[in-house]
Amino acid sequence: MKIAVIGAGIIGVTTAWELARDSHEVTVFERRIATAEEGSFANAGLIAPGYLGPWAAPGMPFKILRHLLAQHAPVRFSLPLSGSDLAWMWKCWRACSAETHLRNRQRLQGLAIYSRARLHELAAELEFEFDHSKGLLVLLRSERDQAQLRPGLQLLREQGIAHRELKPEEARAVEPALNPDTIFHGALHLPDDEAGNCRQFALLLKNAALARGVQFAFSSTVERLTPGAGMAVQLAGEAQPRRFDAAVLCAGVDSARLLAPLGLQLPLAAVYGYSVSATVREPLNAPRSAVMDERYKVAITRLGQRVRVAGGAELGGRPERQRKAAIQTLYKVLQDWFPGAAVLSSGVQTWKGARPMLPDGPPLLGASGIPGLWLNLGHGSGGWALSCGSARAVADLVAGRQPETDLGGFGLERLQR
Ligand SMILES: Cc1cc2nc3c(=O)[nH]c(=O)nc-3n(C[C@H](O)[C@H](O)[C@H](O)COP(=O)(O)OP(=O)(O)OC[C@H]3O[C@@H](n4cnc5c(N)ncnc54)[C@H](O)[C@@H]3O)c2cc1C
């Protein structure tokens, strides 16, 4: 088939690759001048099935309220919030029950395990070399942090995800550079979770896809999708739409805008976050792999010769307006755990990006209900971790095959209830 992929973030590039693997003729439309320029640009890099879960969780509304006015609040709101932001928050709140959270967490973890295996296959087959490290240490500053993590441990056991609760001295053996002056309560070690450079992987896979015949049309904004005898893709500045047999929508936070005229109203929010990336100053003072500060929800990852600190959740506001306070929180967390790890006086890259997030957590994968239009979107805080598996599963559906991973709960139906 002749297939259009809309968006060249990590989801669009992996999708294009898997469709090309199935011998489709693929064209990727991307409004930016290159791959992974938006939400996939400088994320934390976690490929962590053991940590991944929906943000809608029991106790989450209370945690947000408790820290709302704190200097280093993990969640912030840019006021005034729009009506759709408020509706999204209401749906998110409704998905916070223990039962719904657990079900969605199970789904996400299952897909993430499958996805990590697919990522490993691709990286081995294509001989990719990209910045990558193994192991995730979740740092628990207090007993309360530990108590909040405990209900998820049963699920880790059920999913067969290796994990170990550690005392502070054991955690220091895993990450010897942890600041000796920072007192903490304990840690959870997930030895099979990983971190990797998402953008670097996306660029490598884009080149591999090009070599396989995929066409990339950059600086090409899709204005409209029109079904009928396949899918017509209207680009900005072109008089006539381009015709395809099918299209897969991977446009991140802007997917909802393209779906609305087709009668599909998606509760997809842009939940902004930040990262700072800096060169390692002294490897002995830097993390070996990835750590997550559970209180502030900030990740510190080692990506080759760089350290990246990422976190923060901001609802409302604009992508170009950076909040100083959110960036200061990243520096504080780095200073707390790994002072002296990175060169912060020059060459620091600061980034603000959006997580395309549905209120209950899991992404939308599969048929849109509109003939010829497929969805691979709404991966929230786990787009990198879920990308290779989501792409393979969607390509299987397009080919009329049963995906190897269970896609129950990743369809549109759950949002229409
Ligand atoms: C601070 C932060 C930390 C994160 N950490 C992690 C992590 O550790 N692990 C993890 O798995 N995930 C993480 N994420 C989430 C992850 O980055 C996202 O889920 C993922 O990048 C989403 O990928 P995407 O391809 O759907 O979206 P994007 O990368 O945003 O790609 C969508 C693309 O579509 C293009 N587009 C949109 N509309 C159009 C149009 N009309 N025409 C043409 N092109 C269009 C855009 O230009 C864009 O390039 C983090 C996110 C943030 C913000």
Image: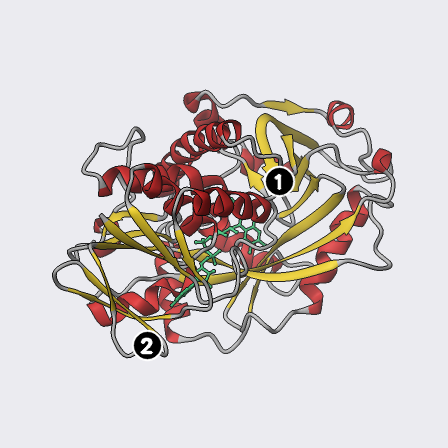
- The mark that comes first in sequence, 1 or 2, is 1
**Residue 5, image x and y in percent?**
34, 55
Give the residue displayed 65% in from the left and 38% down from the top.
Answer: 131
Of all residues, the one furthest to the left in this rendering is: 229
Mark closer to the observer (1, 2): 2
178 to 174, vertically: above or below: below
Q: How many marks?
A: 2
Residue type at mark 1 is Arg
Q: Which mark is residue 144?
A: 1
Q: Quadrant of residue 386?
A: top left
**Residue 117, image x and y in percent?**
45, 28
77 to 72, vertically: above or below: below
Q: Which mark is residue 244?
A: none
Residue type at mark 2 is Glu
Residue 193 lies left or right of residue 99; in this view the side is right
Q: Secondary structure at mark 1?
A: helix
Residue 284 lies left or right of residue 45; in this view the side is right
339 to 154, vertically: above or below: below
How far is disc 1 from disc 2 in space, using C-alphas? 57 Å
Q: Does mark 1 have its CB less than 8 Å from ligand 1?
A: no
Residue 71 lies left or right of residue 260; in this view the side is right
Query: 133 and 221: which one is in front?
Result: 221
Q: Which mark is residue 238?
A: 2
**Residue 229, image x and y in percent?**
12, 60
> Circle 2: is it few (<14), some (14-19), or many (20+) Cα within 10 Å?
few
> Circle 1: is it few (<14), some (14-19), or many (20+) Cα within 10 Å?
few
